[in-house]
C-alpha cells in the first residue's frame, strides 16, 4: 500500500514537473528538416544569427526517414506543430500538397527558381539538387551509364549480382529512382526488373550511405546512390550520373510552408533564405556538393558541382513522377513486405 | 520477406544469443556478487557494457570492421557476436542478483538419482527437479531478459543487413503502410515474447530463494575466450575508439549549447522513465506482497505487453493517442519510454525482490532487538531492502538513455534527446565531436551503475560504526 502511494506521489510530481518545464516556448519557429544535419545546421544557424528568429529543428533520422517527417505532418494536421518543411526529395511535398496540407507562398525565392523545379501554384519550391549516380570501384570508373546498365543486365542474366548494391526501394531517393523507371519504362518492365534483381542476388541494404560504404570497402563493385553520398566516398570509389532513356535523375531539395503554420511571417523569411543564391552556393561548396538550380554562375562553383550541373538540362521533369508515385508505393509495399 | 519469416529468424537469433549470453555470463556471477579485489574489475566491465550505447557499438563495428561486418558470409556471425555482447551484461547482472534456491545442489542431485532406471527418466527427473528446486529459475529469468533485448533489437540488425520483425515493421512504417495495419501485424511477435516472459516468471514463482554467495567457477579457456570476444567487440573496441577519437574533444563538444540542452533532456527522460518504471514494477511485482501472486503475475504480464512490441510500435501508438493536447510536451515520449522499459523493470524487480522475502532482514531486525542494537539492524535492513530499488534504477536508466526511436518520433521540437542527433551524425562517419558526445553519453550511463555499490558501501560503513558505538 505504502509503495503504491509512493508511486502515485512520485509519478504525479514527475508529470507536474514535466508539464511545467516541458512546455513549448511559443516564439520559436518549428522546422522539420529531412536534409542531412551536418549540411543543414550551418545554414539554419546562419539564418537564426542573421534574423534573431529562434528555431526549433526536428531532423530526419535513419530511424524515421523522410517519410517519417511527412507522416508526422499528416498526423499533426489538426494541430500543426511544423511551420516549415525542408524535404530532401520532392515526392514527399507532392504528397502533402495532394492532401491539402501546404500553403502557397510566392516570395522572392519562388521567383528566383526556374519553372521546372517548382510547383506552379507555389505550394513548394525545389532548390539545391542531387543526382542519382552509379558508384563503382576504380576498375569500372571509365564505364558510362549505358555500359554499366549492360554490365548489370549481363550479371542479372547470369544470376550473379552479389556485387551490385542498391538501397531498399521502399523509401528515400531509391523510391524516387524506381518511380522514374516506372514513369519512363512502364509498370511491367519495373516489376520484371526488380524480380530479376532479387533473383540474381543483388544486395539490398538500408540506405544510400550503406551502398557507398559497401563499394568503398570493396565488398561490392558497383551500386546506385546519390551524388552527395558518392562525394563522401572520396577516392575510395568513382561515380557516374545515372541515365535512364537519355534522362538524368535529378532530385532537388524542396521547401514548403505548412498550412496552419503558427509563425507565418518568420516561416516566409526562412523559405526565402533557403531559396537564396547564398544558400545554394553554401550547399554547393559544402561536403554534399549540391547542385544550384537558380541563377548561380558556374565559375563560383567547385568543378565537381559544375560538372554535375551540366546534366540539369537533361533531367527528368518532376511532373512526370507525380502520377506514378502512388501506384509505385502501393506496389512496393506489397512486393517488398510480402503483404 | 514476410513478417512471419522475419519473426522466425529473429526469434532463432535471439534464442541463440540469449542462450550463449547465459552460458558465458555464468562465471561472472561470483565476480559481480563479491565486487571486491580483482573481481571488481569484472563488475566495472559489466557496468561499462551496459552503459555503452548500441549506437556506439554499430559506429565502431562498421568503422573498424567494415569488410567483416558487411561481407555476406560474415555479417550473420558478426551480428550474433554483437547481440551476445549486448545481452551479456544484463544477463550477468540478473544471474548475479537472483538468489539461488534453498534446495542445495546436493539435494537436487540426490533427487535425480532416485528414478535412475532409464536415461530419459533420469533426464526428465533432473529437469523437473531443477525447476522444482528453482535452481534453473535464475537462468530462465536471465534468458528471458536476454531474449527480449535481442528480439527487439533494431539498430544492430538493420546496420548489418539482417532480417527481423523490427526491421520489417520499420520498413512498413517508413514505406507508408497505414499505422493501424502495421500495428495489427505486431500481435505475433508480441505474443511470442510474452510467452517467453510468462514461462520465465512462472518458473521463478515456483522457486522462492535464499541468497548464498555463488562459488567462483574454475576458469574454462573457451568460455573466457568467448566472453572476451563478445565484450571486446561491444565494450573494449567501441570505448577505445571513443576514447582515442573523442577524449580530448569532450570540452569542445559540450561547448555547443544545442548539445548541452539535448544531453540535459536525455538525462531527464532517462532518469524519470527509469524511476517511474522502477516504482511501477515495485508495485506490480508478485514477490513484494505475500499471497495473491497469480493475480499479480497476470497484472505484471499485462503491464509488460505494450513494451514487448518494441520502441517503434510504442512510439507509433503513442503518437496516435497523444495527437491532441499533450502533443507539444515531452510527456508522450516519457510515457512511451516508460512503457518500453517496463518489461525489463518487472523482470529485474521480480528477480531482485526475492531478497525482500529472504530471512536476512528479519534476522537482522530480530538480532538487533535481542542485542539492543536497533540502529545497526535498521541500517542492515535498509541496505538489504534498498539494494533492489537502486539496482533496478541503475540498469533501467542507461537502457532508456540509449533510446533513439521513441525520441525521434515523439520528442517535441524543443526537447530532443542527444541520441537522435548522434544517430544522425554517426550516419556520416567518424568525427571527433560525435565520438566525444558518445563518450559523454556512455559516461552518463555508467554513473547510475555506481550508485548501488556506493550505497552498499556507505550503508555497511554506517552499520559498522553503529555497532562499534554500542
Image (cartoon, coloured by chain):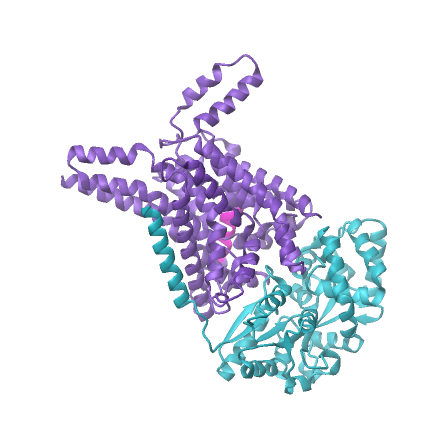
Residue nearest the viewer, comparing B133 with A34: B133
x then y, percent, for residue B379: 24, 42
Quadrant in which residue B147 is drawn: top right
For the stretch drawn in magenta, the main secondary structure is helix
Give the magenta range: B233-244
Where does the C terminus of chain B fall, quadrant-wise?
top left
Q: Position of residue B162 (x, y in %)?
A: 65, 48
Instruction: Indicate left or right for B356 with A176 as reference.
Output: left
Q: Colour of chain A?
A: cyan
Residue that protrudes farthest toward the top in the picture: B117
Q: Residue at x 18, y 35 (%)?
A: B369
Using the rendered view, name the quadrant where residue B457 is placed.
top left
Q: Is residue B242 left or right of residue A5?
A: right
**Quadrant housing residue A43:** bottom right
Q: Position of residue B428 (x, y in %)?
A: 59, 63
Kindly identify the residue that appears in the image at 14 percent across and 41 percent down: B469
| Rendered view: B260 above or below A282 | above
- Residue B106 painted magenta: no
Amino acid at each position: 500500500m505504502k509503495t503504491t502511494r509512493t508511486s502515485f506521489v512520485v509519478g504525479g510530481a514527475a508529470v507536474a514537473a514535466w508539464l511545467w518545464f516541458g512546455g513549448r516556448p511559443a516564439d520559436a519557429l518549428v522546422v522539420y528538416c529531412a536534409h542531412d544535419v551536418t549540411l543543414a545546421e550551418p545554414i539554419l544557424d546562419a539564418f537564426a544569427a542573421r534574423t534573431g528568429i529562434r528555431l526549433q529543428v526536428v531532423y530526419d533520422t535513419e530511424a524515421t526517414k523522410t517519410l517519417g517527417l511527412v507522416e508526422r505532418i499528416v498526423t499533426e494536421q489538426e494541430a500543426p506543430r511544423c511551420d516549415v518543411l525542408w524535404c530532401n526529395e520532392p515526392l514527399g511535398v507532392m504528397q502533402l500538397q495532394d492532401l491539402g496540407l501546404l500553403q502557397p507562398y510566392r516570395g522572392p525565392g519562388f521567383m528566383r527558381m526556374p519553372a521546372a523545379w517548382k510547383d506552379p501554384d507555389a505550394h513548394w519550391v525545389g532548390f539545391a539538387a542531387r543526382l542519382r549516380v552509379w558508384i563503382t570501384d576504380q576498375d569500372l570508373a571509365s564505364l558510362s551509364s549505358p555500359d554499366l546498365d549492360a554490365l548489370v543486365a549481363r550479371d542479372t542474366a547470369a544470376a550473379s549480382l552479389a556485387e551490385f548494391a542498391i538501397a531498399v526501394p521502399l523509401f528515400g531517393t531509391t523510391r524516387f529512382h524506381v518511380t522514374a523507371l516506372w514513369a519512363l519504362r512502364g509498370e511491367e518492365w519495373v516489376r520484371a526488373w526488380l524480380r530479376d534483381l532479387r533473383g540474381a542476388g543483388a544486395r539490398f541494404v538500408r540506405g544510400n550511405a550503406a551502398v557507398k560504404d559497401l563499394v568503398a570497402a570493396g565488398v561490392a563493385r558497383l551500386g546506385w546512390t546519390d551524388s552527395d553520398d558518392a562525394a563522401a566516398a572520396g577516392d575510395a570509389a568513382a561515380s557516374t550520373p545515372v541515365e535512364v532513356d537519355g534522362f538524368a535523375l535529378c532530385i532537388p531539395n524542396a521547401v514548403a510552408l505548412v498550412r496552419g503554420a503558427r509563425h507565418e511571417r518568420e516561416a516566409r523569411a526562412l523559405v526565402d533564405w533557403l531559396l537564396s543564391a547564398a544558400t545554394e552556393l553554401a550547399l554547393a561548396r559544402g561536403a554534399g556538393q549540391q547542385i544550384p538550380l537558380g541563377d548561380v554562375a558556374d565559375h563560383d562553383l567547385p568543378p565537381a558541382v559544375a560538372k554535375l550541373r551540366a546534366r540539369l538540362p537533361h533531367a527528368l521533369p518532376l511532373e512526370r513522377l507525380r502520377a506514378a508515385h502512388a501506384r509505385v508505393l502501393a506496389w512496393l509495399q506489397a512486393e517488398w513486405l510480402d503483404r | 520477406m514476410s513478417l512471419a519469416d522475419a519473426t522466425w529468424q529473429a526469434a532463432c537469433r535471439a534464442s541463440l544469443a540469449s542462450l550463449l549470453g547465459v552460458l558465458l555470463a555464468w562465471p561472472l556471477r561470483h565476480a559481480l556478487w563479491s565486487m571486491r579485489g580483482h573481481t571488481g574489475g569484472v563488475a566495472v566491465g559489466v557496468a561499462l557494457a551496459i552503459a555503452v550505447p548500441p549506437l556506439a557499438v554499430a559506429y565502431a563495428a562498421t568503422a573498424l570492421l567494415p569488410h567483416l561486418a558487411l561481407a555476406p558470409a560474415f555479417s550473420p556471425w558478426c551480428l550474433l557476436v554483437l547481440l551476445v555482447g549486448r545481452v551479456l551484461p544484463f544477463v550477468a547482472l540478473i544471474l548475479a542478483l537472483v538468489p539461488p534456491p534453498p534446495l542445495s545442489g546436493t539435494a537436487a542431485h540426490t533427487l535425480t538419482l532416485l528414478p535412475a532406471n532409464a536415461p530419459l527418466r533420469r533426464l526428465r527427473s533432473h529437469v523437473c527437479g531443477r525447476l522444482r528446486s528453482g535452481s534453473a529459475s535464475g537462468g530462465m529469468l536471465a534468458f528471458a531478459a536476454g531474449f527480449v533485448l535481442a528480439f527487439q533489437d533494431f539498430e544492430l540488425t538493420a546496420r548489418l543487413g539482417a532480417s527481423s520483425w523490427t526491421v520489417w515493421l520499420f520498413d512498413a512504417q517508413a514505406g507508408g503502410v497505414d499505422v493501424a495495419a502495421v500495428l495489427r501485424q505486431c500481435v505475433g511477435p508480441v505474443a511470442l515474447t510474452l510467452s517467453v516472459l510468462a514461462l520465465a516468471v512462472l518458473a521463478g514463482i515456483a522457486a522462492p530463494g535464499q541468497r548464498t554467495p555463488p562459488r567462483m567457477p574454475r576458469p574454462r579457456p573457451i568460455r573466457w575466450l568467448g566472453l572476451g570476444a563478445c565484450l571486446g567487440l561491444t565494450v573494449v573496441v567501441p570505448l577505445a575508439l571513443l576514447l582515442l577519437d573523442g577524449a580530448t574533444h569532450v570540452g569542445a563538444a559540450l561547448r555547443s549549447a544545442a548539445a548541452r540542452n539535448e544531453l540535459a533532456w536525455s538525462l531527464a527522460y532517462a532518469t524519470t522513465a527509469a524511476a517511474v518504471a522502477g516504482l511501477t514494477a515495485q508495485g506490480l511485482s508478485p514477490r513484494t506482497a505475500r499471497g495473491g501472486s497469480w493475480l499479480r503475475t497476470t497484472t505484471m504480464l499485462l503491464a509488460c505487453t505494450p513494451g514487448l512490441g518494441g520502441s517503434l510500435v510504442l512510439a507509433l501508438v503513442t503518437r496516435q493517442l497523444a495527437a491532441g493536447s499533450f502533443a507539444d510536451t515531452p510527456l508522450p515520449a516519457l510515457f512511451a519510454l516508460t512503457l518500453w522499459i517496463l518489461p525489463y523493470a518487472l523482470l529485474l524487480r521480480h528477480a531482485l525482490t526475492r531478497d525482500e522475502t529472504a530471512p536476512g532482514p528479519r534476522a537482522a531486525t530480530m538480532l538487533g532487538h535481542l542485542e539492543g542494537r536497533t540502529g545497526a539492524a535498521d541500517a542492515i535492513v535498509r541496505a538489504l531492502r534498498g539494494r533492489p530499488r537502486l539496482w533496478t534504477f541503475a540498469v533501467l536508466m542507461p537502457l532508456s538513455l540509449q533510446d533513439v526511436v521513441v525520441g525521434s518520433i515523439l520528442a517535441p521540437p524543443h526537447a530532443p534527446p542527444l541520441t537522435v542527433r548522434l544517430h544522425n551524425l554517426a550516419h556520416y562517419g567518424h568525427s571527433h565531436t560525435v565520438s566525444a558526445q558518445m563518450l559523454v553519453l556512455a559516461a552518463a550511463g555508467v554513473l547510475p551503475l555506481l550508485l548501488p555499490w556506493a550505497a552498499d558501501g556507505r550503508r555497511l560503513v554506517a552499520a559498522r560504526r553503529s555497532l562499534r558505538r554500542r
